[in-house]
Image: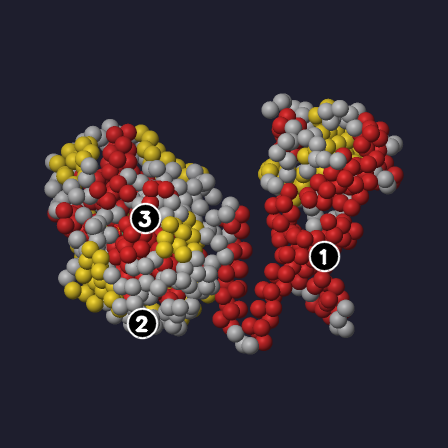
């Protein structure tokens, strides 16, 4: 990229709000040696010179263009063709021509009409930075700062000209995007043109009502906010609508259909539709920026860089409740959506994984209120009530969501596609695709049996018996969900006990799950009835604090309302066997799930051979347990845990690498790890590979470290444990998070 100035002489033709602001920004930031302006309105032109917006006011359009190496057309869209005709002969060799119009197909058509083609030196542009004000007096040199500018270069566009034009716009403070002409016009029709049309139309309709004085007198915030853009320049907008006719008509038709649907809902007293549309819209409005990046509203962390800076030492004290259980939160939304009636959930985990599930059901037409401090109200649509989503369902980092959805969606009448972030896109999906195919599902996986999953709807599923080769609650749950829709009985046998929340929660919704030893089965064709769910605190999140308070000196910590499902308590069993001091208090059963308060105090841990049957019961807690093993005396051996290699990261290797970076030696085996306890944990930098549980494990390792630890790539902690940093600080862990939003 050449250094500033990017052009010698810039001609701005048309000194309205946009042209004037660009001229002014180019001068202010020294983006060209000279800015010459031209406008057919002599007063505006004189004023531009007087206000110092341009260096020179050209007397004729040819004079403006003649020696310029960049010509910017900032004229009304419908004047483009005649202006191009006027400047044609005066254009200097090698000059770049661009524009700022709101519609790009019409600009290209005008260029082609005048030049017979779209020459390489013409690069259409559009700054998204208008305002309802117009004229040179409204021009501001900072109008484009923090705004977007779209360039729509053709494939043959002059690369040097494109680079310099882009640099010039960036020099005004704008972010430059490039896209095709057609895409630009579709996007703008929806995001800009339609809202202007509605604003003009609404104000005009109301102004025509008899009580218009009253309407305007009482017009409060909502009306004012909504109709601000109806004060925009009518001539400019009439140009835009006529120039972007086809794209605008398409989006008007779409909007009219949706408006009709709302009208019928109101007329027919159909509150469900209103609630569904409004709650979906509210969520969409609150998560604009996520939507813009094409992601689910709540699940795109990959572009955030969060680093944990840990200071060594500390004690862990207090009385805390960690956020809700992730597995149960996912299932509460899924079953609540499929139930008849309204399900209320307390203690829902507002982490990005379970929010991705929640959003996906909204995308399938389910009205869901909240979450609001863990409270969610789901207006169930019944087992057969889901609607086709408009696009792929993006499930972020969540393997649970993808595998459970696979079962559910395989049985729907519509097609669907499931996608995820970089980590999820590497995880094995054949384990669900294959047994589902045996039930009659039609599913395509991506390369190597990985996401995306493309699921063909409209298949009749039949029950099967499946002997699971891996102990996976996700596979079991996937098949049981598909089994709700299958003909006959679907039964799944697990090689070792895995979490049974799906079975318990189905029973809670009145759907019988037959259990016989290691086999769970459902008979298809039944219904679910809404219920109330109280999600306990997630034992997998509590695990970090169980280890933290065990390894840090003088610690005494109470964890409230922790889920104690026997298929989840492996971490307590293992830690207790290692000599941890964990007191289980107030054990009780809430909504079919055991819950207790846990008091943990410092203890001298000792290494053990971890019993293999505990592996599935502690599957998510091993990264934290490895830290406990390092702080223990003697050797800890883990075997039979190859599943750890296909979690959000390869948790055996990534933990071993992180420990090595802190000076701790371990021996990695294909299905586990051997850790000699008592080694010093030094300071250093650790890569979490975007795995939430790796980040949090090294955060607690700092309690016993001899120097500061930096942990990279920690944004995904928000997938399972929002508020981790605050809670860690509150209990005495010396953490500082950098980056993020
Ligand atoms: C989960 C099951 C486990 C676990 C995951 C959540 C679930 O995975 O690791 O975090 O909610 O069913 P697998 O069943 O694949 O072992």
Disc 1 to disc 2: CB gap under 8 Å: no
Q: Which residue is mark 1?
A: 230
Which one is in front, 404 or 110? Answer: 110
**Residue at point 36% right, 55% down?**
442
Name the spot of residue 12 as percent of width and height, x first: 77, 34
Q: Quadrant of residue 685?
A: top left
**Residue at point 51% right, 50% down?**
291
Does residue 728 appear to the left or right of 169 in the view shown? left
First in sequence, mark 1 or 3: give its number.
1
Q: Is residue 448 above or below residue 9?
A: below
Name the spot of residue 76 as percent of width and height, x first: 77, 45
Q: Which residue is mark 3?
A: 429
Q: Is residue 2 above or below residue 203?
A: above
Q: Secondary structure at mark 2?
A: loop
The answer as to whether callout 3 falls within 8 Å of ligand 1 is no
Name the spot of residue 688 as percent of width and height, x first: 33, 37
User: Tag on residue 526?
Assistant: 2
Any part of residue 727 in sight: no
Question: Mark 1 to mark 2: distance in Å?
Answer: 53 Å
Which one is in front, 54 or 419? Answer: 419
Disc 2 to disc 3: CB gap under 8 Å: no
Q: Quadrant of residue 23?
A: top right
Question: Mark 2 to mark 3: distance in Å?
Answer: 27 Å
Looking at the image, what colour scheme do you see?
A: secondary structure
First in sequence, mark 1 or 2: give its number.
1
**Residue at point 76% right, 66% down?**
207
Which one is in front, 235 or 107? Answer: 107
């Amino acid at each position: 990229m050449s250094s500033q100035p990017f052009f010698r002489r810039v001609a701005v033709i048309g000194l309205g709000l946009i042209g004037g602001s660009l001229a002014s920004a180019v001068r202010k930031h020294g983006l060209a040696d000279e800015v010459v302006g031209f406008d057919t309105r002599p007063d505006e032109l004189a004023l531009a010179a007087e206000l110092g917006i341009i260096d020179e006011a050209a007397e004729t359009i040819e004079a403006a263009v003649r020696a310029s190496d960049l010509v910017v057309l900032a004229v009304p869209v419908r004047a483009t063709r005649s202006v191009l005709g006027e400047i044609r002969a005066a254009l200097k060799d090698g000059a770049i021509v661009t524009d700022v119009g709101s519609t790009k197909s019409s600009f290209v058509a005008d260029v082609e009409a005048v030049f017979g083609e779209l020459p390489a030196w013409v690069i259409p542009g559009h700054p998204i930075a208008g305002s309802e004000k117009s004229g040179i007096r409204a021009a501001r040199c900072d109008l484009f700062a923090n705004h977007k500018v779209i360039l729509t270069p053709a494939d043959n566009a002059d690369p040097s000209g494109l680079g310099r034009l882009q640099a010039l716009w960036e020099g005004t403070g704008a972010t430059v995007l490039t896209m095709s002409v057609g895409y630009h016009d579709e996007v703008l029709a929806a995001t800009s043109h339609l809202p202007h049309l509605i604003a003009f139309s609404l104000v005009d309709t109301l102004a025509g009502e008899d009580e218009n004085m009253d309407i305007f007198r009482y017009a409060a915030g909502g009306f004012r906010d909504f109709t601000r853009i109806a004060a925009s320049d009518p001539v400019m907008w009439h140009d835009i609508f006529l120039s972007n006719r086809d794209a605008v008509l398409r989006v008007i038709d779409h909007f009219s259909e949706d408006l009709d649907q709302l009208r019928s809902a109101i007329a027919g007293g159909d509150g469900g539709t209103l609630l569904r549309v409004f709650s979906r819209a509210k969520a969409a409005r609150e998560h604009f920026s996520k939507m813009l990046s094409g992601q689910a509203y709540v699940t795109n962390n990959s572009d955030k860089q969060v680093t944990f800076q840990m200071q060594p030492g500390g004690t862990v004290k207090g009385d805390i409740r960690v956020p809700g259980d992730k597995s149960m939160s996912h299932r509460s939304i899924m079953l609540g959506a499929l139930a008849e009636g309204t399900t209320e959930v307390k203690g829902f985990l507002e982490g990005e994984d379970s929010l991705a599930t929640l959003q996906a059901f909204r995308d399938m037409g389910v009205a869901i209120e909240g979450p609001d401090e863990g409270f969610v109200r789901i207006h169930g649509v019944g087992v057969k009530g889901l609607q086709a989503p408009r696009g792929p369902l993006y499930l972020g980092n969540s393997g649970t969501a993808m595998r459970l959805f696979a079962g559910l969606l395989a049985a729907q009448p519509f097609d669907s596609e499931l996608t995820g972030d970089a980590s999820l896109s590497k995880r094995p999906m054949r384990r669900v695709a294959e047994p589902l195919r045996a039930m009659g599902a039609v599913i395509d996986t991506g390369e190597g049996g990985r996401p995306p999953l493309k699921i063909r709807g409209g298949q009749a599923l039949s029950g099967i018996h499946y002997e699971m080769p891996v102990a996976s609650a996700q596979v079991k749950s996937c098949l049981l969900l598909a089994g709700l829709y299958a003909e006959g009985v679907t039964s799944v046998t697990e090689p070792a006990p895995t979490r049974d929340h799906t079975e318990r929660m189905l029973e809670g919704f009145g759907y019988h799950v037959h259990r016989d030893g290691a086999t769970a089965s459902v008979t298809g064709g039944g219904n679910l009835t809404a219920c109330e769910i109280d999600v306990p605190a997630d034992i997998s999140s509590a695990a970090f604090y169980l280890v933290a308070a065990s390894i840090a000196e003088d610690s005494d910590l109470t964890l409230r309302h922790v889920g104690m499902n026997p298929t989840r308590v492996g971490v307590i069993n293992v830690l207790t066997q290692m000599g941890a001091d964990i007191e289980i208090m107030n054990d009780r059963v809430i909504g079919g799930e055991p819950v207790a308060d846990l008091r943990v105090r410092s203890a001298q841990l000792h290494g053990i051979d971890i019993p293999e049957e505990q592996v599935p019961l502690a599957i998510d807690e091993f990264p934290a347990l490895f830290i406990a093993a390092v702080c223990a005396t003697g050797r800890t051996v883990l075997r039979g845990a190859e599943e750890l290699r296909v979690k959000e990261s390869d948790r055996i290797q990534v933990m071993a690498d992180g420990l090595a970076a802190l000076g701790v030696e371990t021996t990695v085996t294909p299905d586990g790890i051997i850790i000699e306890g008592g080694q010093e944990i030094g300071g250093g930098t650790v890569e979490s590979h975007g795995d939430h549980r790796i980040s949090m494990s090294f955060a607690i390792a700092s309690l016993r470290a001899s120097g500061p630890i930096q942990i990279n790539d920690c944004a995904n902690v928000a997938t399972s444990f929002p508020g981790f940093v605050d809670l860690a600080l509150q209990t005495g862990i010396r953490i500082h998070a950098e980056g993020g939003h």
